[in-house]
Image: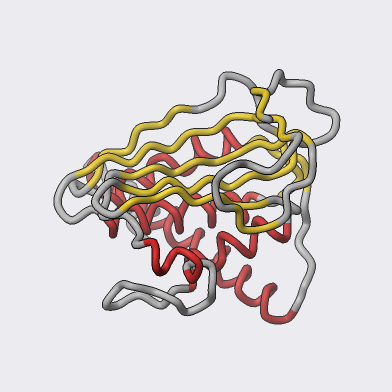
């Protein structure tokens, strides 16, 4: 209604557009939950991860507010994968929310993308199965409180949370999406030193972007 009123106030228009974007994202999320529960299929197609990140920047910045500053370090070329926009949006949304909640006052969140080539599994802990090949990744790094070693093996489980008002679903969704896309997740963290979560998705077969070589 605010947008239809054609209000000349730039601030009101900007906030109305943000509300509309958030509402559309909520609709997509509810459809995702229904699809997950009823095992309905998703319309996967080739898409560029970088474009998904760019489209989400405004809402992610507003989610963090004054608590965290987000820096974006995106790969210079296209990062094509076979997925849906909803999957990529959910990864970005949930990881950014977790990073923001891990920062008590002011901190930094860095969202980066790139492509790598894995011949063997990474040396850090992996959630999922690593097959040799090229992967595009989304990495979300924060300067928050970090994750204690004794709970690291539990973070992928549904409903597990350390937040007072959390439900544990967000991070579980990230792991579920990675598995659905034949990818995997790595988590690097230390208490009081922050957390880095990286989601790897197989690169679309017809893409020839030069990867980083990882043994």
Nearer-the-camera pick, 210 or 82: 210
Q: How many marks?
A: 0
Residue 102, quarter of the rendered image: bottom left
Residue 108, quarter of the rendered image: top left
- Measuring from the top left, give residue 69's x and y in whole percent: 26, 39
Task: Determine if residue 17 is in view.
Answer: no
Q: What residue is drawn where x is 49% and y is 73%? A: 169
Residue at the left extreme? 105
Above or below, 40 against 57 in this view is below
Indicate left or right for 75 with 78 as reference: left
Q: What residue is drawn where x is 65% and y is 56%? A: 178
- Measuring from the top left, give residue 177's x and y in whole percent: 64, 60
Q: How is the structure coloured here? A: secondary structure
Above or below, 123 against 157 in this view is above
Indicate left or right for 93 with 137 as reference: left
Indicate left or right for 143 with 202 as reference: left
* Quadrant where the C terminus is found in the figure: top right
Above or below, 46 against 23 in this view is above
Indicate left or right for 55 with 79 as reference: left
Q: What residue is drawn where x is 18% and y is 46%? A: 66
Q: What residue is drawn where x is 31% and y is 47%? A: 194
Residue 22, quarter of the rendered image: bottom left
Task: Determine if residue 140 is in view.
Answer: yes
- Measuring from the top left, give residue 165's x and y in whole percent: 29, 77
Nearer-the-camera pick, 200 or 126: 126
* Quadrant where the N terminus is found in the figure: bottom left
Nearer-the-camera pick, 10 or 140: 140
């Amino acid at each position: 209604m605010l947008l239809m009123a054609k209000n000349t106030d730039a601030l009101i228009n900007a906030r109305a557009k943000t509300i509309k974007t958030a509402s559309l994202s909520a609709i997509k999320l509810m459809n995702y939950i229904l699809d997950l529960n009823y095992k309905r299929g998703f319309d996967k197609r080739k898409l560029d991860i970088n474009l998904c990140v760019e489209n989400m920047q405004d809402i992610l910045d507003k989610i963090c507010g004054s608590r965290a500053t987000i820096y974006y370090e995106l790969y210079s070329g296209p990062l094509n994968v076979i997925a849906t926009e909803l999957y990529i949006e959910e990864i970005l949304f949930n990881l950014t929310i977790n990073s923001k909640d891990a920062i008590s006052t002011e901190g930094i969140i860095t969202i980066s993308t790139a492509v790598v080539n894995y011949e063997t599994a990474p040396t850090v802990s992996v959630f999922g199965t690593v097959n040799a090949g090229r992967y595009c990744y989304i990495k979300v790094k924060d300067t928050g409180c970090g994750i204690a070693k004794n709970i690291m093996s539990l973070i992928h489980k549904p409903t597990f949370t350390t937040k007072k008002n959390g439900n544990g679903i967000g991070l579980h969704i990230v792991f579920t999406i990675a598995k659905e896309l034949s990818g995997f997740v790595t988590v690097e963290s230390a208490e009081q030193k922050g957390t880095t979560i990286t989601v790897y998705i197989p690169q679309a077969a017809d893409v020839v972007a030069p990867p980083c070589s990882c043994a």
